[in-house]
Image (tube, rainbow, N blue to C red):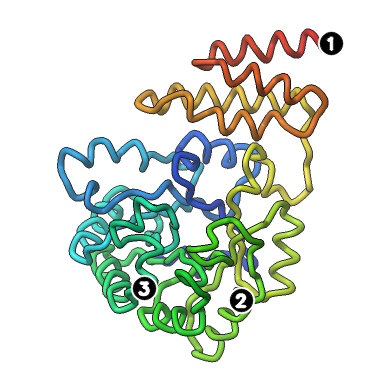
């Protein structure tokens, strides 16, 4: 099976996996208006994915369209056997790759010994990568992780990961303890690149953290030597983010795309609460005069129709 990572032009730019954010509707807006080189799903638990009944509920998080390719399914858990089984399921679903979440710092996942907690158990982390590669039937396996758990251990942690030969490692420039409370440390991400080079490993190194424009992403590639950059929060409300012409939409176009997003969310994800769209409304309705007033009104909407009516009235008032 082809390793799509090897075919990406360098530098490449990715849309990060984010819980209750990077669903099929969110990704579709980027596919239509400014497609990155690769996209990721929300993270899906291997325990649920391998359970016949629970899997039905997980299918919504693994929806994608052909426009969104190459697309990678991100999975999380603790059991190597379940990672192996889940990898086979992901392969059957037609994804181009599998990403293992070893970076989420949230208390729920940490309490289970998963995600960023795996930094504390490197032997298990290596076993999980190998099991995922075995079950994925040739799909490239990547890892998204952090500099460390309570302290920065990138020197030792990265060597452990490289020993399992993942196709790519995305390194978020903070520890689990730091979450998003401090600036991302790109000097330590550069250290990871240097370690990879000294080890003569083929694994790609992707930097992540505090990237708020495509120009900034290119600058970080030049300064820190990463093969690519993954963008998360910086792309909220801006599906034009990855366009190479630095396109900046006007207010009306921005709101029209927001409504398109809301409509797709309602149509494609009826199982999910429409209230999830509120975080997107906050991002779309920002940076222009009257945005705070519009945001306040959008927070009261319960469906796409109400959202469209609010925008129509707001625009009319300012005509």
Task: Kindly check if marks 3 and 1 are in contact, taking CB atoms under 8 A apart as contact.
Answer: no
Q: Earlier in the sequence, mark 2 or mark 3?
A: 3
Q: Quadrant of residue 308?
A: top right
Residue at 48% of width from left, 77% of height from top? 203
Residue corresponding to mark 2: 188
Q: Report which residue position mark 1 lands on.
A: 319
Residue matched to label 3: 120
Q: Is residue 94 above or below residue 270?
A: below
In the image, what residue occupies the spot 50% across and 16% down? 303
Q: CA distance from mark 3 to mark 1?
A: 57 Å
Q: Are marks 2 and 1 in contact (CB under 8 Å)?
A: no
Q: Report the front residue among 180 and 72.
A: 180
Q: Is residue 207 left or right of residue 254?
A: left
User: Element under label 2?
Assistant: helix
What is the C-alpha distance between the residues marked 2 and 3?
A: 19 Å
Q: Position of residue 160 (x, y in %)?
A: 39, 82
Quadrant position of the N terminus in the picture: bottom left
Q: Nearer the viewer, mark 3 or mark 1?
A: 3
Label 2: how many Cα within 10 Å (few below 14, some 14–19, many 20+): many
Q: Secondary structure at mark 1?
A: loop
Q: Nearer the viewer, mark 2 or mark 1?
A: 2
Residue lying at 29% horizontally and 79% vertically, measured from the top left: 123
Q: Of discs 2 and 3, which sits in the foreground?
A: 3
């Amino acid at each position: 099976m082809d390793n799509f990572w090897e075919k990406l032009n360098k530098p490449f730019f990715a849309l990060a996996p984010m819980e209750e954010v990077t669903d099929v509707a969110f990704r579709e807006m980027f596919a239509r208006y400014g497609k990155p080189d690769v996209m990721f799903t929300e993270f899906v638990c291997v325990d649920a994915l391998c359970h016949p009944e629970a899997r039905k509920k997980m299918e919504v998080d693994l929806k994608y369209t052909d426009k969104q390719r190459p697309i990678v399914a991100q999975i999380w858990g603790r059991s190597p056997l379940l990672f192996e089984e889940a990898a086979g399921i992901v392969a059957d679903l037609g994804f181009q790759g599998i990403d293992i979440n070893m970076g989420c710092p949230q208390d729920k996942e940490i309490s289970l010994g998963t995600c960023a907690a795996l930094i504390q158990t490197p032997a298990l982390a290596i076993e999980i990568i190998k099991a995922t590669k075995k079950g994925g039937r040739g799909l490239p396996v990547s890892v998204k992780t952090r500099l460390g758990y309570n302290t920065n251990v990138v020197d030792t942690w990265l060597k452990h990961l490289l020993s399992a030969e993942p196709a790519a490692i995305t390194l978020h420039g903070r520890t689990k303890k730091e979450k998003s409370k401090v600036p991302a440390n790109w000097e330590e991400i550069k250290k990871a690149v240097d370690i990879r080079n000294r080890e003569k490993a083929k694994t790609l190194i992707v930097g992540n953290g505090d990237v708020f424009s495509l120009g900034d992403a290119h600058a970080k590639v030049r300064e820190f030597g990463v093969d690519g950059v993954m963008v998360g929060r910086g792309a909220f409300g801006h599906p034009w983010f990855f366009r190479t012409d630095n396109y900046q939409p006007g207010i009306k176009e921005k709101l029209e795309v927001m409504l398109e997003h809301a409509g797709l969310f309602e149509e494609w994800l009826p199982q999910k609460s429409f209230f999830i769209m509120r975080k997107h409304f906050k991002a779309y309705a920002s940076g222009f005069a009257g945005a705070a007033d519009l945001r306040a009104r959008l927070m009261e909407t319960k469906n796409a129709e109400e959202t469209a009516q609010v925008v129509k009235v707001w625009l009319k008032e300012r005509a």
